[in-house]
Amino acid sequence: MARQLRQAIHGVFGLLSMVWLCTTIYLFTSVTLPTSSRENSSKKKILSDDESRTQDTSSGETTIVNNQVNLTGIYFPALDENGNPGYVHNATTLHNNPPVFNTSGIQCGPNDATMQLLTQRVYVDLAAHERANKLVLEGGGKPRAKIYCHIYTTQKQRPRIQSIRETWGHRCDGFHVASTITDRSIDSVNIPHEGEEAYKNMWQKVRAMWVYVYVNYYDSYDWFHIGGDDMYVLVENLRLYLESEEIETASNGGDQPLLLGQIFYQNFYSSATYVTGGGGYTLNKAALKMLVASFPNCAPHDVTSVEDVL
């Protein structure tokens, strides 16, 4: 099992409960934020099946209470191709219609560093993966863990997105790319956020991404993985690890918030750790809810690139 953990993402993975500074306060206080009781004639419902989501047309303020978490002021509806707000991406499109892996022009010599990595260090446990699938089909196993993957990018990195779609992206149960343009052909979604579109403002971009995922996909998936357009995820290994007894025990049936990722030490002090965003990190449903609930009070207007440290 330790081997599956090491191979899951970027070769090295660690496990810990949610320890982010901004979220630990919610371990001891309720994350339930009540729906506002204000009535206003200028408000209109923007979702026909969700009475808790309303918009004040006079101020443009959106009041949303989703799964008892108040998202007012932190939810930025995605924009479609024409710039209209409210776009919700069909997250299963890539999984159900994987593109052909284009290998033309790709060559690796025996001493090539990439070839050595692929043949000597990377191991995908396809046999265990297929056994687990077979058990489910025969009615003798638990349903497989459903993983949602979302990555951040910009339009200029479009070639990277196609590579991800052809290799590991379609192995996730749900998938989208947070970009500056909505393009259904590559599963990219324009998710606005506070401040400019810049690396130094990554914290605001990632905040908006997590809220978008929470609002639209929380109920349909078990685990949520985020990372950049330069990572490669061995989804089969990750799924097997998430289904392991170790994780089942640690999550306490899903009630315990869990954050999985590679542990880094901040400023070389072992007492100050964080999960690096380089290889991405994975949250269960409880952790996602805790994280989003913390956003209104957690560095709400900070401009910084260290979203993983926060």
Image (tube, helix red, strand yellow):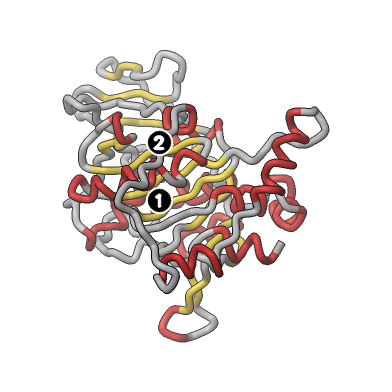
- Residue 59 percent across, percent down from the top left: 20, 29
- Residue at the outermost front position: 110
| Residue at disc 2, secondary structure | loop
Q: Is residue 16 found left or right of 243 in the rendered image? A: left
Q: Quadrant of residue 267?
A: bottom left
Nearer the N terminus, badge 2 or badge 1? 2
Q: Quadrant of residue 111?
A: bottom left
> Which corner quadrant holds the N terminus?
bottom right
Q: Residues within 10 Å of mark 1 (few under 14, many from 20)?
A: many
* Discs 2, 1 touching: Cβ within 8 Å: no
Residue toward you, 17 or 182: 182
Would residue 310 be seen by someone viewing this image from the given angle? no
Three-letter code for the amino acid on which mark 2 is drawn: Val
Would residue 229 be seen by someone viewing this image from the given angle? yes
Residue at 44%, 33% in the rendered image: 98
Three-letter code for the amino acid on which mark 1 is drawn: Phe
- Residue 196 percent across, percent down from the top left: 17, 52
| Residue at disc 1, secondary structure | helix
- Residue 25 percent across, percent down from the top left: 53, 60
Number of numbered discs on residues: 2
Q: CA distance from mark 2 to mark 1?
A: 39 Å
> Which corner quadrant holds the C terminus?
bottom left
Q: Is residue 24 found left or right of 128 in the rendered image? A: left
Q: Is residue 182 found left or right of 208 in the rendered image? A: left
Residue at 36%, 27% in the rendered image: 88
Residue at 33%, 66% in the rendered image: 306
- Residue 128 percent across, percent down from the top left: 71, 48
The residue pinned by badge 1 equals 295
| Badge nearest the viewer, 2 or 1 | 2
The residue pinned by badge 2 equals 100
Q: Quadrant of residue 181?
A: top left
Residue toward you, 163 or 145: 163
